[in-house]
Image (tube, rainbow, N blue to C red):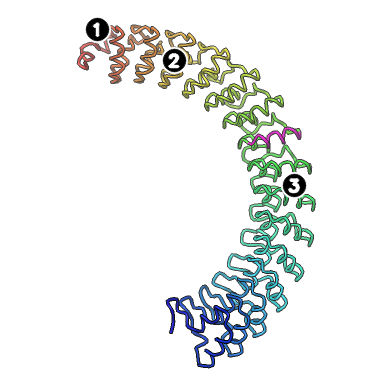
Amino acid sequence: AVNKGGWTPLHIACGNGHASCVRVLLGAGANKEAADEDGATALFIACQHGHEACVRVLLDAGANVEAAGYDNWTPLYAACRFGHEACVRAMLGAGADIEAADCWGCTPLHIACQHGHEACVRAMLGAGANQEAMQKDSVTPLYIACQNGHQACVRALLGAGANMEAADYDGWTPLHAACSRDHEACVRALLGAGANGDAAEKNGATPLYIACSNGHAACVRALLDAGANKEALVINGWTPLHAACSKCHEACVRELLGAGANKEATTKSIGATPLYLACQKGNEACVRAMLGAGANMEATQKDGATPLFIACQNGHAGCVRALLDAGANVEVVANNGATPLNIACRQGHEACVRALLGAGASTEAAQKDCATPLHAACQEGHAACVRALLEGGANKEAAENNGWTPLHAACFQGHEACVRALLDAGANIESAENSIGATPLYLACQEGHDACVRALLDTGANVEAVAKNGRTPLHAAHSNGHAACVRALLHAGAHRGAAMQPDFGRVASTACTWF
């Protein structure tokens, strides 16, 4: 008779540790090899649950020690998995295969190491288990023990002579594994046994780099104490300090700096220093640690950008303030002609803008096209930055090479809030740009930004201003099909029959059909 899971009375007796019942059932001819739905025999169940007496009764009766169940688990594997040393020793005494692996290539020794069962590990090693056996992913028992932080198992394996440098497919050694999971005790055990602290995986990462990337300061300290190379490069030219700064791990940064790590090392791709990466990610604590150690805050990467640039670009106001407190140059110019203030305005980072202005940044520093920070803020629609610049005395009439003022830029892009901020500051609403002499109202009408049109009209913009092509704002709105702008202009008194150059005809007759 079997239950729903396929268990026979013998399975049940073994699962509950009733050795006397097991004897009775075997004496009555119970099938000791009957398997449940997962392929588990009574011996497997007894080993799984740690019932040594039942195990020995079954072994005495000749139970198959290699009967494999689900995922090819043997009874010995089950005893190791659940840490039942007495059952392990009983199985070993009965000649169980100590290398019988599951479907993933995991041996009983692997599984005992994975779960930290030191007594089982020592029993297996004492029976001659292969401490260099590899799973399908090429990891050894020592690697598994280190990965899971089981120091006692690690020491048992090291005592048995396990290879500390056996690497997986990616080139990771047991030391890499221990460092990745912050298992300091395992790290120190390996280093104390002579493990190579500078072993590099396939991308060049050493255990120190891995520890820094993951923020494991205790492991970093252990590696540095053992003399690990703090300047070892991965394939992209990053050092452990780059990794710690990029991942915002302040404690690791301080450990490396205390050990004398190179603060000015640059990456291969963009020439970034560790300080640049810390500013890029916005970790003020790492930035201040680097600055406190004397990192060069004016170091430029390949595009001419300094740490202050990237902090402004990404809106990390805390980092910006830290750099400014340390005396960073607010007027440095990148290869594209931009200053930190220009970058902060273009990205809309008001707090950075105000910090830069407070440090004396010039509001008039222009890029190669003569665009000022105010132009950039207006073009991108960052009204808060516009107001900050105006409060800081920015020239609202500054013209780009094409003659556009900030008001032209805001009107062309349709940023009403920026338009109103400029108008409130008294910006010239009749300024004409260079190409056709268009006013801000003309551009707003041309692009169909009726909210900007209304703001300009409310301020008294000239609805009859004629561009060099002979067209008025009404012509521009009508020819581009912007009915709302046409209505606003007509309501403001625009002349319906305004003459145009011969090639353009007249606007009045068609415009009137819209109402």
Q: What residue type is labelled 2?
A: Arg
Q: Which residue shows up at 49% across the image and 81% down it?
A: 35
The stretch of residues the image draws in magenta is: 283-293
- Count how many numbered circles sit on residues in the image: 3
Give the CA separation, mark 3 to mark 2.
Answer: 55 Å
Of labels 3 and 1, earlier in sequence is 3
Secondary structure of the magenta portion, mostly? helix
**Residue 287: in magenta span:** yes
Q: Is label 3 or label 2 in front?
A: 2
Name the residue that disc number 1 marks.
Answer: 497
Find numbered disc 1 in the image and state the secondary structure of the residue it sits on: loop
Count neighbours of disc 3 (C-alpha within 10 A) and say few if under 14, some if 14 to 19, many if 20 or more. Answer: many
Q: Which residue shows up at 55% across the image and 18% down it?
A: 388
Q: What residue type is labelled 1?
A: Gly
Q: Nearer the viewer, residue 112 or 128?
A: 112
Q: Residue 230 carries which label?
A: 3
Of labels 3 and 2, earlier in sequence is 3
Compared to residue 445, the image places residue 137 above or below, namely below
Q: Which mark is residue 420?
A: 2
Image spot of residue 457 (x, y percent): 36, 10
Q: Quadrant of residue 130?
A: bottom right
Image spot of residue 447 (x, y percent): 36, 20
Residue 389 in sight here: yes
Q: For the residues labelled 3 and 1, say whether their Cβ atoms are less than 8 Å apart.
A: no
Compared to residue 93, the image places residue 213 above or below, namely above
Q: In which quarter of the image is residue 450?
A: top left
Count neighbours of disc 2 (C-alpha within 10 A) and say few if under 14, some if 14 to 19, many if 20 or more. Answer: some
Give the CA separation, mark 3 to mark 1.
Answer: 79 Å
Of labels 2 and 1, earlier in sequence is 2
Q: Which of 67 and 116 is in front in this view?
A: 116
